[in-house]
Amino acid sequence: MPRLPFPLLALTAGGVLASLAACTTTPVAGPVEVTRFHRLPAAPGTPRGALRLELVTSDASSLELAPYRAAIAAELTRAGYRVLPASAGEGTAQSVARLRLEQERFRPSSGRSPVSVGGSAGTGGYGSGVGLGIGLDLTPRPGEQIETRLFLTIDDAASGARQWEGRAHRIVSSKSDLAAPDASAQALARALLEGFPGESGETILVK
């Protein structure tokens, strides 16, 4: 079965950044922008079978990524999936979810300075290639902002056909309590999977 020609995948980095231009100077948390596409039954809470959750990263045990995995797993469970433990065999899942996290720290007056939270690898329609960045100094600076982008895809384990995919992102002040990994993970995961599977093709703002 061919993959869906999701228009989300045609977004360029420049287009995403342009849409955020009005938010980059705010010192407080902005809303979470969420876009989703899927071919799943729309009824929330429908039992959806066993799912294996993978991190698309160079280090699956990264402490920075752990809160995001836990938050996504909790939301997927609420959405009707039975999230398998990491030790489960590959043949036991009906679906495979892949989670990718990107984060940047920047000051509106001086531009963006990318900081990786472990590593990232493009998969499916989100692009290709593998990258790894290391931030040497994460000390908050005056006016510093943090943009976090969370990507999730769900594929059929047997055929590899794309069933669902979405992206959530938000900008917060580095001094905000919402910049903490646990708070950020919970907010983004909740927004991304709220009312799962959501309205396909729609971009929403979740406060």
Image (cartoon, grey):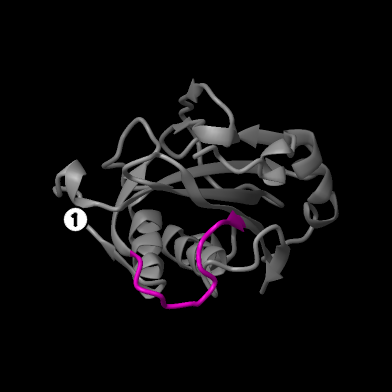
Front position in the image: 104 or 93 = 93
Q: Which residue corresponds to the image point at 66% horizontal and 40% vertical from the top-left? A: 5
Q: Is mark 1 on a helix, strand or loop?
A: loop
Query: Residue 119, percent across and down?
Result: 44, 32
Question: What amino acid type should be assigned to the residue bearing mark 1?
Answer: Pro
Q: Is residue 141 left or right of residue 19?
A: left
Q: In which quarter of the image is residue 83?
A: bottom left
Q: Is residue 160 left or right of residue 177?
A: left
Magenta includes 76? Answer: no
Q: Can residue 115 be seen in this view?
A: no
Q: Residue furthest front?
A: 1
Q: In which quarter of the image is residue 57?
A: top left
Q: Is residue 155 left or right of residue 32?
A: left
Magenta part of the protein: which range?
Answer: 37-48
Front position in the image: 195 or 49 = 49
Q: In this view, does 96 lie above or below 45?
A: above
Query: Residue 190, percent across and down?
Result: 50, 69
Q: Can residue 204 be seen in this view?
A: yes
Q: Name the residue under label 1.
A: 85
Query: Residue 21, percent across and down?
Result: 83, 49
Q: In this view, does 31 lie above or below 141?
A: below
Magenta includes 42? Answer: yes
Task: Name the quarter where the C terminus is drawn.
Answer: bottom right
Q: Which residue corresponds to the image point at 49% horizontal and 40% vertical from the top-left? A: 1
Front position in the image: 108 or 61 = 61
Query: Residue 196, percent across and down?
Result: 51, 70
Front position in the image: 105 or 5 = 5
Report crowding for label 1: few under 14, some 14 to 19, many 20 or more residues within 10 A (C-alpha).
few
User: What main secondary structure does the magenta stretch of the protein show?
Assistant: loop
